[in-house]
Image (cartoon, rainbow, N blue to C red):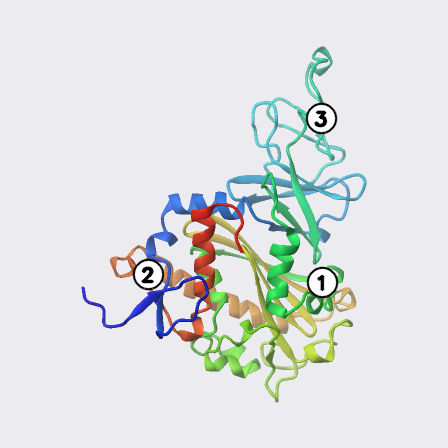
């Protein structure tokens, strides 16, 4: 087959003279072996945003999450800190907690042989344990997972030697906004959950990130969003210029489904950030959307080559939620955007197996920055470990 265009592959962020450059080939979106390698070299090696800290307010509260190939248990310990462990009994490998969320009084007990662990992970009891005095209860405690709290969320890393949190997670935010201070103005860790919606997306995680990174599709599938943010109708990648926020339309009063007035501006948000929308990708699985009166926080959980769970939080000032004010108009705007985006990703997923996509698709100039993401993915898989 002779191609009628000149499409070059993305190459390490260099300028491209051609209008069209190549995406990743189709098999990288469907091959289970490639997905497993991504689980190992990306999701199990980087900081992974797992749970919102406020979801576990009391000692004994827990949630289990899937990170790469591992089930991880996150719990609030008796000293008030969050801790994370591999959700595996050290005796015979049974899954310790089978529920996704819950609360225990003092300890976690394996349902197989009743080995019992404190909230600090230490082995505290087991049948006939007293007759086995040589067992080190700390050594045979739950396997700990490194945990760091930032922006009100617990970020976990399974790697034996985690990458620098400042260089990776915080670095991605600073690269987007020009500094880390602008996101700190939103006091995200002080906001309250107003709504949470989970989406079970039948698409590869990379398709979801690629979609989030460009607005070439916005005029086609996001009529509500482009009414609020008119510059998105031009299909530009303006939200990815460093420090740039997309401006609200002149006749728009708030980031709501109909452009009507939202809530009071968050107290720390600067006048320069008012009436502006910022979109941030934090590799490998977080999207943050900043608007003056609330924050939208997405976490992706890649479960299979063709399936990704996305959990989306709408966060508001405490008094907005406590007073029972109606958040539905602001939730509805981005809920529609999410549905439109995920429907598009699901339409693309079957074509990843088509012979027409053997060599991938193409990126137009306003999408060329997606090539940087592709370069990063390939470097992670070929070099191993964390690469920026």
- Decide which of 47, 66 is in the foreground and name it: 47
- Of the 4 image quadrants, the one containing the C terminus is bottom right
Residue lying furthest top:
131
Q: Quadrant of residue 193?
A: bottom right
Report whether 331 appears left or right of 53: left
- Decide which of 139, 10 is in the foreground and name it: 10
Q: Tell me the residue that label 1 is attached to.
A: 188
Report whether 375 appears left or right of 103: left
**From what the image shows, is residue 338 above or below residue 292?**
above
Earlier along the polypeptide chain: callout 3 or callout 2?
3
Please tell me whether mark 3 or mark 1 is closer to you in this view: 3
Q: Residue at x 78, y 72 (%)?
A: 267
Q: Tell me the residue that label 2 is attached to.
A: 360
Query: Where does residue 322 sit, x and y in percent of width and height?
Result: 78, 64
Describe the element under mark 2 as helix, strand or loop: loop
Q: Quadrant of residue 353?
A: bottom left
Q: Residue at x 37, y 52 (%)?
A: 28
Q: Quadrant of residue 158?
A: top right
Query: Where does residue 291 sit, x and y in percent of width and height?
Result: 65, 73
Q: Tell me the residue that label 3 is attached to.
A: 138
Describe the element under mark 1 as helix, strand or loop: helix
**From what the image shows, is residue 239 above or below residue 9?**
below
């Amino acid at each position: 087959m002779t191609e009628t265009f000149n499409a070059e592959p993305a190459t390490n962020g260099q300028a491209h003279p051609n209008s069209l450059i190549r995406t990743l080939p189709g098999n990288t979106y469907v091959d289970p072996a490639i997905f497993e390698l991504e689980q190992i070299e990306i999701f199990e090696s980087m900081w992974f945003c797992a749970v919102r800290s406020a979801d576990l307010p009391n000692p004994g509260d827990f949630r289990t999450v899937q990170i790469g190939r591992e089930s991880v248990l996150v719990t609030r310990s008796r000293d008030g800190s969050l801790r994370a462990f591999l959700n595996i009994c050290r005796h015979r490998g049974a899954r310790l907690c089978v529920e996704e969320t819950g609360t225990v009084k003092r300890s976690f007990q394996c349902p197989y042989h009743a080995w019992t662990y404190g909230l600090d992970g230490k082995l505290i009891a087991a049948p006939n344990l007293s007759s086995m005095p040589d067992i080190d209860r700390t050594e045979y405690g739950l396997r700990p997972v490194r945990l760091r709290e930032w922006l009100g969320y617990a970020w976990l890393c399974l790697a034996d030697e985690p990458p620098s949190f400042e260089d990776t997670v915080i670095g991605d935010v600073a690269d987007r906004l020009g500094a880390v201070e602008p996101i700190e103005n939103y006091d995200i860790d002080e906001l309250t959950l107003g709504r949470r919606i989970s989406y079970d997306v039948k698409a590869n995680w990379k398709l979801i990130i690629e979609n989030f990174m460009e607005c070439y599709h916005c005029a086609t599938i996001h009529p509500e969003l482009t009414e609020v943010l008119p510059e998105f109708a031009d299909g530009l990648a303006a939200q990815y210029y460093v420090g740039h926020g997309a401006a609200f339309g002149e006749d728009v009063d708030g980031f709501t489904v109909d452009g009507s007035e939202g809530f009071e501006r968050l107290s720390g948000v600067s006048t320069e950030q008012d009436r502006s929308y910022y979109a941030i990708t934090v590799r490998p699985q977080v999207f943050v959307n900043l608007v003056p009166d609330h924050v939208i926080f997405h976490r992706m959980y890649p479960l299979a080559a063709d399936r990704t769970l996305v959990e989306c939080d709408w966060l508001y000032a405490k008094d907005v939620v406590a007073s029972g004010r109606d958040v539905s108009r602001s939730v509805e705007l981005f809920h529609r955007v999410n549905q439109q985006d995920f429907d598009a990703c699901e339409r693309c997923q079957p074509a990843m197996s088509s012979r027409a996509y053997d060599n991938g698709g193409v990126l137009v100039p306003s999408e060329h920055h997606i090539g940087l993401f592709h370069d990063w993915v390939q470097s992670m898989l070929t070099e191993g470990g964390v690469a920026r």
